[in-house]
């Protein structure tokens, strides 16, 4: 075997359920989840992973699996991995763990993925007031390219990356998380008023034993009960990295993760074939199973050396990322702008979230003039290599956010034309996203579509 | 003269004050500001412009001009320009005006620029609670490159662009602006609570005759009084384009602007030699005087054809931009992340503004470990070609924003190192930004630095 | 199995010799070599391949295997593959076969490669008069990156590609090849005079049964004898594609190959982890075993539709290539120039070969000032992603060729410095290429190093 | 005036003839041509220049000016410039002169250019046996873009660069040039046989007083007679740089030129709005007048430090170039291949010139299937940003050269299509290049078109 052949430390058997894998997976962050393997610095190793739902969403022609999913079970992660130096001394709290992403891809035999939006009553997405139904598109891969039968006329190269990569939190950090997220939940009513356009989504996802998988900790044991009630959900990115969804974190990238527990306890999962900045539909990347080939280094005392806490404790830090040199060239981008005025015409103060929402809505509306449904474009902008930028954040009262779309991913010229073009849809494309009906109570907001 | 020699329609005399230029400049948006020139579609024309402050900020070694500036006078714009088709028929409300940016640059003889932060009592910037003083850095240009005596060890190619380009609003649109921005001001107290970390900055900049320049409308006339009291300030980007600060809007780009008044009445100004996404320090690009060579097309009924109103009226639209093929290649980027937890440790709900603020603060703190002051890095991240991304906007409760910095702009390797490096500043660089003392009442926020 | 899982049609068993593989390999071009598999258009399939020498060169610390190799055995190819359309009708002479390269890489468990130069008496390389010895460097892969213990301080991302991809020639085309190459051999003396700097290398590699492997044709049979005596060697690229060594032919590329025999009979091999334009050292890419995942389309009558014969028959055509969007970004390149004046000072007339030779020699000499041996740089410029350009081909009498090297592949700044630097080698790096002594008769040319 | 405003040291008056300019121009290389200005290291200065023919070719609808041009007068250069260090000490033989190209462009008021091929009896071009007539296309500029009424449907961004930049040769170097080029001329008959496909072009352009312009040396003086009879023509690139035609030498690039005479005596000219690698039609870039803004540094003893002589004397060196970070992004390239078999079917030995010729012919033939004449495509491939590569130079007997064309420059999709397309020209475009009849004796070669 060549010295650079990666050692497989976490295999996945695609025929098994997430909780049947060996070594076992986990879907929470907690310092007590036991490590499943150990690697030395400099060693090339391979981790395989299920898709974030552990196979719940399938390659079929119905969105019912999207509609009925229990989000307490996501994301299934592979690990934790204990990292030691050449002398066998583990990474220690205060170190930085440098993880190089050497290679990655879909699992052989499983070269497909999906993009979806959840039902508004089950979490929704960034634009759930506009798109309350569960929808799904299937993507197939041809090497670097993906295409979807549900969104014809589009094909693009993916910048494949892990959506989640992180170290285990210490108990102290975990307590900080649980405290601040609980406070948000409890102050929900106030937040509700502020963020009315987003209000039907859960404010935070607090610890719950429901759907909890804790690796080698056996369900039903007292330890399981304790850990399950404390362990942080994997939805948000936090100080330990986690679900940061950085779309450019592909081959040749490096992540510098703070170490909070001995051994670092690295976990990863949620592989994306491709994602747009923001991952707006929530189940928004091209989600898939996959593999990562990684190499770790330990930067001793690197947290103190390189990171500056930003908050009440030394733990309030964030990882650093180094993006590699490989990415697709696109010669031209069409850019949609949003300002922080919402759909009802209300002015918000330098609110980049509102501005980005409007930029995405503008892009969806524009592209739907080229023969697509809005649902198709919502899914596409979630997963294609589009860039979401904060263009202006200081020009009171308007934040300006932009969404840039590479025009080459379409098989037609989507730029505005000076010469006369027929009005109405340019092209009727029959296929559409897979869709479930929405049975919920839609009209919570007074102005869902902005019609006062 | 070659058929492609641009016709100079707005010259600037650098020895004159903004209000002495011929044709006259203006610093407000209003449909009644008379046009100063007319161009035909397809015609290449040249507009020159003063820097946004009209020469108030000078190439000297003091930041006093930054500290004492009256922001009621900005931004000085060139125009408005009336656009007609080949038959002489003007652009009409409902059309789209396609403006191609063929060429641009600094004004010959004036090849320098500046970046600054305003005093907290005079508008401040994105991070004014951390950086309350007025500061300034001077930049000199060597072709595509800029360097600053105040920030040594850094040199980068600029993506030069106009910060402001827009059409005149109709009275109806102007009324919408004034109404919604007044409402924000009036509800300021409520907003104050929400956005406490940003609270010392003006919420909106409402119309005021103070400092107002209205082109050919003579000051003191009844018309001037009326228009001055209604005309919108130029600070925020809005439906007409305006101050959108899109850093990639350089040579070969196109802007598709909605037309609200007959003739379109195109104005432009606020030339930037280079800008980082977000322009975080507010006076944050490399601000300069400059010229634009433009070419216009009219897309008849283009608003209906291509734009979808998002709000109570058909006027709630946004421009579209097409980014050209020319930009600097950078092989490597270092990426800093922020989540929507503020400096006091408080959790915000999917707030991209808070997340981006933390990403910028993380980057400043990190870079200051390489021999720079934090003020130097705040200015640098405002104006260098860094990218501000909304990476995740759906993973409740944390928005994830990232700031990506091209490592090649530094003359040292700024990446974290695995091998032992001495702690403390890597390199003491003596020069620093030009700085004024802060005399105001700093501790308005309870937790300016996050220390509860 | 996902519909996009490639069907493996040519597996390689790394424990077996090239002539033991099943299906069998071949190392000649001939229409009578039987196909080993059939694929339909649109189908994704996988071909594995040995390295070009079939495992003769090994991962050890001696260059003896390079020195003693029998070049009659190269290149071992996988195939031929018969291509049929959806109705089962095979590709026909006159069609174009469009082959998309969907994915590729090293064979799992065999993630290493080598670069070498042959002994001058055994074929040499582009600069064999300067570098007559056999040398070798081993490269290890970490995902997209390669590094070599023999050339420290260098690491670069590879643009992996197949060196050889081609269709089978018809007998008519094969006869044309054999005739023109035989004529070249026979006129060798004349050519000798012209190309004296290159003269020790074989002029052509004519058919020979020695070392011949013909797939399913059993050795010793009359058919074998006939085919072996006619079949074209694989060294040069020709009308059927073959050894074109286009370094950018990586993921997402497409090759449009002329079809000369029914079924097209596609063969491929000679996988390169990375190669510089020109592949100057001859065994010059990072040679490795590997796999290709391909998809074919048939363009009926495409030869007539798209290709124009350039020569006495309709068969004098060349393939067309479409380069994909994925490649590493390099921000800066150092460019070395050569003109068509040779090392003896003699002027050649618009000779791009002489000009390129001098550009490569200039680059080697320059880089060797940074602590490297010239042999290290000769191998490096063969395999790193450098670009060899024909910059000027019309300015009599000098052709100008350039070699552009991305500066980022070195761990030191290799640009000339204005400030005082110590003369002599900047840095002594102890490791060097693996090298054999040269025992041959070196001084054939009167002016090997240009010293008259 | 800002400290970075370039000092204009060589102005051009477009209303004057080349020999009327002040300071005067020159069109030969000789150490005795007096310098016209002096610059200090670090100083930003501006040089303006006429187009290479000094205004002979005009913006009109006839190619007669191309047909009748006297090539003894080209190229008109601006300079020489004497370079001194901060202490006033001039650059000295053995130094390297580092010249940074800070800015460049067309001369204001003269924003157009031309591409042409010369009549076969007057120098011809790379493909003169195929295209013996004088032809011309006019290009107009819109900022970074160029378009031609004679080649509709094409528009591309230019990488503007000076075709010629070089230092003055010493007498010793000049003597080497004249000797070796005279030898080539004298051995012309032999060369004729070898290079039969190129044979009608001049082998070398030896010194001649005809058309000679020597700057401040007054015509008719004894000095003029002497210098004119010795001074090197400017057509070929040589050891001093000169006509290197490196298409990427645009904004932000650096040239490291050897210094052969005190003061370096830098000259430059032959501005190109855009050029393809090889500049195949000879008058092949988009030729224009223009300006350069430069900055020089002196690397003392840099020739010894960085360059290695390759030939009988220490003067046999070549410049080094550093390509800047700014260039257009193209997402897709179509690549045409040529091998070293000529149009008559004859095999040449590793001849990159023959291979590149065939690649260019293949590309022309292919593109002419999309509604273009071959003359249009010959001119286009001379001046558009296409890349000419030496892909394989070791695979005896075939050199493989490739020509890569960015597909985005066409307004139609020029890729081969799998689906049925009508045969014959896709689109009849009426406009064509401007063309003169060819009156010469065409059939000199036995096989001009390869028909044996």
Image: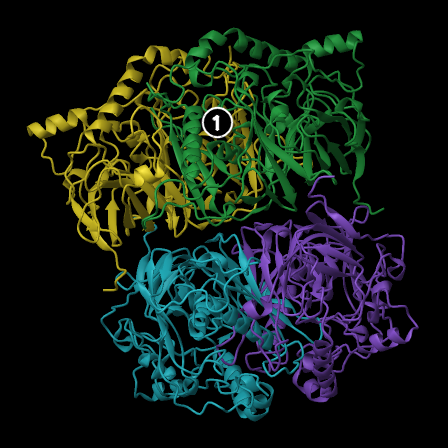
Chain colours: A green, B yellow, C purple, D cyan
Which residue is identified by label 1?
A: B356
Q: Is residue B208 above or below residue D128?
A: above
Q: Is residue C445 above or below residue C366?
A: below
Q: Quadrant of residue D219?
A: bottom left
Spot the residue most to the left: B221
At 73% across and 70% down in the image, what residue appears?
C125
Q: List x then y, in percent, for residue A226.
A: 73, 8
Total tally of numbered discs in the picture: 1
> Which quarter of the figure is the N terminus of chain B placed in?
bottom left
B340 with respect to A326 (left or right): left
For label 1, count other residues whose C-alpha is less than 10 Å away and answer few (under 14), some (14-19) or many (20+).
many
Q: Is residue B402 above or below residue B178?
A: below
Q: Is residue D268 visible?
A: yes
Q: Does dot 1 land on a helix, a strand or a loop?
A: helix
Q: Is residue B209 visible?
A: no
Q: Quadrant of residue B122?
A: top left
Q: List x then y, in percent, for residue D77.
A: 37, 72
Spot the residue most to the right: C220
Q: List x then y, in percent, for residue D266.
A: 41, 68
Q: List x then y, in percent, for residue D213.
A: 34, 80
Q: Which sits in the foreground, B307 or C210?
A: B307
Q: Is residue C227 above or below residue C252?
A: below
B237 with respect to C127 (left or right): left
At 85% across and 71% down in the image, what residue appears?
C212
C419 with respect to A60 (left or right): left
| Label 1: chain letter | B
Q: Which sits in the foreground, D250 or A147?
A: A147
């Amino acid at each position: 075997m060549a010295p650079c052949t990666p050692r497989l430390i976490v295999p996945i058997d695609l025929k098994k359920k997430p909780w049947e894998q060996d070594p076992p997976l986990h879907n929470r962050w907690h310092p007590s989840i036991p490590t499943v393997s150990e690697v030395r610095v400099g060693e090339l190793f391979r981790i395989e992973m299920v898709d974030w739902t552990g196979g719940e969403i399938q390659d079929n022609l119905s969105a019912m699996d999207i509609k009925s999913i229990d989000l307490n079970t996501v994301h299934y992660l592979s690990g934790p991995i204990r990292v030691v130096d050449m002398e066998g001394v583990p990474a220690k709290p205060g170190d930085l763990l440098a993880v190089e992403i050497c290679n990655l891809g879909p699992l052989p035999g499983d070269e497909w993925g999906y993009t979806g939006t959840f039902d508004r009553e089950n979490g929704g997405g960034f634009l759930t007031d506009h798109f309350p139904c569960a929808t799904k598109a299937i993507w197939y891969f041809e090497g670097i390219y993906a295409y979807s039968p549900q969104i014809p006329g589009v094909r693009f190269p993916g910048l494949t990356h892990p959506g989640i990569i992180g170290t285990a939190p210490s108990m102290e950090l975990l307590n900080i998380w649980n405290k601040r997220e609980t406070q948000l939940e409890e102050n929900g009513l106030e937040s509700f008023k502020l963020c009315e356009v987003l209000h039907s989504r859960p404010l935070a996802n607090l610890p719950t034993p429901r759907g909890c998988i804790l690796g080698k900790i056996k369900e039903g044991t007292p330890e399981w009960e304790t850990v399950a009630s404390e362990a942080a959900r994997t939805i948000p990115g936090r100080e330990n990295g986690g679900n940061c969804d950085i779309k450019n974190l592909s081959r040749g990238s490096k992540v510098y993760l703070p170490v909070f527990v001995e051994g670092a306890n690295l976990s990863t999962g949620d592989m994306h074939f491709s994602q747009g900045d923001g991952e707006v539909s929530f189940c928004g990347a091209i989600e898939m199973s996959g593999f990562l080939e990684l190499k770790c280094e330990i930067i001793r005392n690197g947290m103190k050396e390189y990171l500056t806490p930003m908050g009440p404790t030394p733990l309030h830090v964030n990882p650093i990322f180094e993006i590699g040199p490989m990415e697709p060239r696109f010669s031209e981008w069409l850019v949609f702008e949003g300002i922080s005025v919402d759909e009802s015409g209300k002015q918000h103060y330098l609110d980049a979230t509102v501005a980005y929402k409007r930029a995405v809505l503008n892009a969806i509306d524009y592209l739907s003039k080229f023969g697509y449904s809005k649902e198709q474009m919502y899914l596409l902008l979630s997963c294609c290599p589009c860039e979401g930028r904060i263009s202006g954040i200081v020009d009171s009262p308007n934040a300006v956010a932009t969404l840039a779309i590479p025009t080459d991913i379409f098989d037609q010229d989507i730029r505005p034309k000076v010469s006369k073009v027929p009005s109405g849809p340019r092209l009727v494309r029959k296929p559409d996203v897979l869709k479930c009906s929405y049975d919920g109570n839609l009209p919570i907001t007074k102005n869902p579509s902005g019609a006062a």
